[in-house]
Amino acid sequence: MIPGTFSYYRPDSVDKAVALLTELGEEARPLAGGHSLIPMMKLRLAQPEHLIDLSQIAALKSITREGDTVVIGAMVSQHDMIDSAEIAASLPILIETAKLIADPQVRYVGTMGGNVANGDPGNDMPALMQCLGATYVLAGPNGTREVAARDFYEAAYFTKLEPGELLTQIRIPASPAGHGYAYEKLKRKVGDYATAAAAVVLTMSGGTCASAAIALTNVGDTPLLAEEAASALVGTVIDKAAIDAAVAAAEGITDPASDGRGPAEYRTKMAGVMLRRAIERAKTRAA
Ligand SMILES: Cc1cc2nc3c(=O)[nH]c(=O)nc-3n(C[C@H](O)[C@H](O)[C@H](O)COP(=O)(O)OP(=O)(O)OC[C@H]3O[C@@H](n4cnc5c(N)ncnc54)[C@H](O)[C@@H]3O)c2cc1C
């Protein structure tokens, strides 16, 4: 319950936050919503010496549209996203997914940036970002760079974020009009991390699947982009045979942990069941 001691900083710009992170080094951690970091600190699984609170950086709190790209500031809370008309219009799967994350109180403070930067395979947004082809903007002492969500995750709690870097924006191509989508998550109760979950976005043209993207949550050390599974749908009418093929391909790339959510074999099968449901629901939604 009692975290270690730390010094606290509250910069009001990205530049100041990056300068602090750079100056204070590896013992400094950004504090966003605090709903992953503070629980870890209370268990002493994380003991940062310096917390850089991002809550006063207004530039990180907006949701905007730049052409076909939706730009979500790192400090946009999960609640703000659920409430956003822009997100409802351009990326409704984000709202469906966010509603399956945690509970209302956590969603008031938990942020998009914290969820994707955390590196916990249990977080739901990372696989969704891979499914949607999102890009993360990282600000560091040498300027900014962009890393695709599909390249960002290396292992549990290991990402491409370098010391001194701050994730500032998530840039997501708006899904095409008429797309079908679904996020299906199996969990033991409200607020639990997924036993397995699947994100699907697809488009149909003349009754056949024109494009598909699939990613899986919490059935490996990282979120998993299921490219072969998506390819199994494209060009088909998404009949049982195509879904069976996609499910088999997706199950084949899983490597889940055995834990209180069940043994690895069960979680692999549940990834397949979630994917089947997500594909079927996405298809019914596609125009
Ligand atoms: C009861 C409970 C249930 C939950 N259930 C779920 C769930 O089902 N699914 C789910 O996805 N999540 C769940 N969460 C986690 C929740 O969504 C967190 O809020 C989220 O994982 C982290 O976001 P945060 O803003 O709270 O980040 P923080 O806890 O502040 O930070 C998390 C990590 O990311 C780093 N970080 C934060 N922001 C940045 C940034 N901009 N740049 C670089 N590094 C950064 C921090 O230094 C820290 O290492 C749950 C949390 C609780 C307490």
Image (tube, helix red, strand yellow):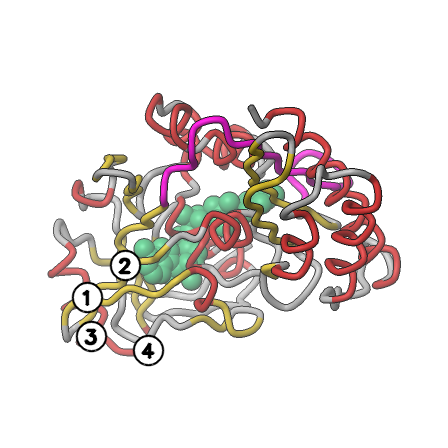
Q: Helix, strand, or loop for circle 1?
A: strand
Q: Which residue is mark 2?
A: 137
Q: Amino acid at mark 2?
A: Val
Viewer-proximal residue, 38 or 132?
132
Query: Which residue is pictured at 14% across the width and 75% down the height?
Result: 142
Q: Which residue is mark 4?
A: 26
Q: Helix, strand, or loop for circle 3?
A: helix
The location of residue 269, given as percent across then percent down, is 85, 53
Which of the two discs, 4 and 1, labels the residue nearer the N terminus? Answer: 4
Asked whether 186 falls inside the magenta stretch, the response is: yes
The location of residue 260, given as percent across then percent down, is 81, 55
Label 3 to label 4: alpha-carbon separation: 8 Å
Q: Is residue 173 left or right of residue 54?
A: right
Query: Which residue is pictured at 56% across the width and 49% down the height?
Result: 213
Q: Which residue is mark 1?
A: 144
- Asked where in the image residue 265 lies, by quadrant, the reply is bottom right
Label 1 to label 2: alpha-carbon separation: 7 Å
Label 1 to label 3: alpha-carbon separation: 14 Å
Q: Which residues are magenta?
A: 173-192
Which of the two discs, 3 and 2, labels the residue nearer the N terminus? Answer: 3
Which of the two discs, 1 and 2, labels the residue nearer the N terminus? Answer: 2
Which of label 1 and label 3 is nearer to you?
1
For label 2, count other residues whose C-alpha is less than 10 Å away and answer few (under 14), some (14-19) or many (20+): many
Label 2 to label 4: alpha-carbon separation: 20 Å
User: In the rendered structure, are the residues bearing label 3 and label 4 in contact, judged by CB atoms less than 8 Å apart?
Assistant: no
Does any portion of residue 256 appear in the rendered image? yes
Q: Which mark is residue 22?
A: 3
